[in-house]
Amino acid sequence: MCGIIGSVRRRPSATETLGLATLCHRGPDAQTSAHAGSAHLGHTRLSIIDLSSGGQPMSDVHGLTTVVFNGEIYNHLELRRELEARGHEFATRSDTEVILATYLAWGVAGFARLRGMYALALHDRRDGNTVIARDPFGIKPLFWTRGRDGSVFFASEVGALLDLSGVSTDLDLTSVLETLASRHPSGLNTLYEHVKRVEPGTALVVAPQANAVIYVRFASVTEEVERCRLEGERNVTPEEVRERVMDSVEHHTLADVPLGCFLSGGLDSSVVAQALASRGGGPLNAYSVGFEGASSETSELPYARMVAEHIGARLHPVTVGPADFVALAPRLSGSLNGPFADHADIALLKLSLRAAEDVKVVLSGEGGDESFGGYPKYAVDNLARPLGPAMRLGSRWLGRRGKLGIAADALSEPSRAARWMRWFANDDASPALVGSLIGAGARPDRALHWVEERLIGYPQGWSDLQRMQVLDLESWLPNNLLHRGDYTTMQASIEQRVPLLDMRLTPWAVALPRQVKIHRLRGKMPLRQAFGDRLPRAVLERPKSGFRLPLGEWLAGDPGLRSMSRDLLLSPGARLRTWMSGAELEALLAPAALAQTGSAKLAWTAVCLELWLQAVHSRAVVA
């Protein structure tokens, strides 16, 4: 895990500096850069593999190519043996050098052979091209832009990219609206007009002096799901599921430093923890979070303790309170990289800071829901046609209150694209703010059009469940959950790995028929059956649950958090006053509003937005 940054200049300058300090939290162990043709490649290193000789930028032994790379290649040992048999020479034990040899052997198409998470930039001295690429799931972030003179810039984080390129911080108001309404911008868009994401599984081949940029797709989750589906596997056994999960977890443990895991007590993180613990080698360090004032009914700590005791792990519980929100919210949202308005991000940052005291690598259960069909929406969406009319009536008085209200609201929508967006719609957006953004030119239909285009491109033989899963793998995960997880853990300088997102596991799981993955209203049946004898029954049977905490009570009653919120939102200079009146902002913090869970989240969203908007105004790269 590291940070990368660089440029391909129209007019290369030997005196250019890349601003490596803006990415030091991603790579505190070393910060280095090198010129290669018209490219300038920078790297900040968090040493995980080959601690002594794996520094970057790295060139192959013949000096033909140079690369900077963020991530891990879990099959680099297998690839190394194959490449050595083809005559390739190596000078280090690092996975980075294997990337170079893979490219020299098979070109951009060779990146499809890399099993892992990565964002990379590689300069080829033979033709002068520079290739920037991102793994098929988008686990590792990579952003790019063109400068005023046409030069190409790229970086692991938006703030570092804006600082290096000097391009305008003009906001993409549609992306701001989408973040409020759907929790993330659609497609390759970001919150800034001039900054785009590199598409997962895609390489941008930048010609010398950035004269042209060609897009090359080298890996596709959609195509791999279809390949697995056409193989026609129907009678999957618990043993095969367990073997595939264990194989992925085993590959994800490749490291020369200590590793642990995040353990929520949910099924996915418990499966990963059990697989890790079964490897032996001493007690596993597991990290879990609870909240001050949260009742035992809403806390996940009892389940985490139950799993840790069952598998023999050493649990490190972390308690999050209002003081953590005061201390950590500016760190997450108070820069050009913000905003991070989900209260779970505060918890994950504190958890990461605690884990960093012991380990450099943590494994988590992210991706299990999308791979094995775990979200409740997957189980009930097929009821939209028979129950739609009744749901339209019910949603009028239920609104989106609670799980039943969310289900009624989504199922009442006859359009598949619109319905699937409604499942993950955000209820924490101020109507006044949304209305002002639309009035200022934000396009509320852009995300829907993007979803409709994706659905048209999926194979005809897929079930609606498979379409929903892949849509989430292409949007919800890379643009929301993985993006937040990467940024939050990197703030603590630790690497998060996600073994339930793996090209040898996930497409295979998505391709399984609905009846294999879902029984009645319960999903992830393959995981439940495969690990049923290895985890506590209470964990296997508990309903899906997220972070729940008394946020409104804290905002209203904690002096520090109340003061910070009021200072930010009620100040005459509040940047949100561009779109909201002082009375509307004050209403967000009214005690009656904070007493309602949805309204409390709305107020917190506004706080994080204000922190970010102030950073945009001052071009603050880091908080």
Image (cartoon, rainbow, N blue to C red):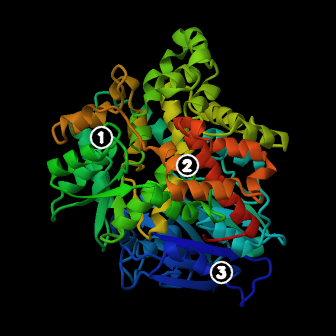
Sequence-earlier tag: 2 or 3:
3
Q: Tell which circle, 2 or 1, labels the residue nearer the N-terminal end.
A: 1
How far apart, in angstroms, are the residues tagged by discs 3 and 1?
49 Å
Q: Helix, strand or loop at disc 2?
A: helix
Disc 3 marks a residue whose amino acid type is Leu
Query: Nearer the observer, disc 2 or disc 1?
Result: 1
Q: Nearer the viewer, mark 3 or mark 1?
A: 1
Q: Amino acid at mark 1?
A: Ser
Instruction: Find the distance from the CA under tag 2 to the CA under tag 1.
Output: 28 Å
When asked about the image quadrant of residue 283, the answer is bottom left
Q: Which mark is residue 167?
A: none
Q: Is residue 111 visible?
A: no
Which residue, given by chain and number where applicable, does mark 2 sit on? 480
- Looking at the rendered structure, the secondary structure element under dot 1 is loop
Q: Nearer the viewer, residue 575 or 308?
A: 575
**Residue 538's spot in the image, x, y percent?**
22, 35
Q: What type is the residue that disc 2 sits on?
A: Asn
Q: Residue at x 78, y 68 (%)?
A: 167
On screen, 179 above or below 238?
below
Q: Quadrant of the N terminus?
A: bottom left
Q: Determine contact: label 2, label 3, CB under 8 Å.
A: no
Considering only order in the chain, which callout, 1 or 3, is on the residue closer to the N terminus?
Answer: 3
* Residues at circles 3 and 1 in contact by the CB criterion of under 8 Å: no
List the residue tagged with mark 3.
Answer: 18
Q: What residue is pinned by disc 1?
A: 296
Residue displayed at 35% across by 79% down: 50
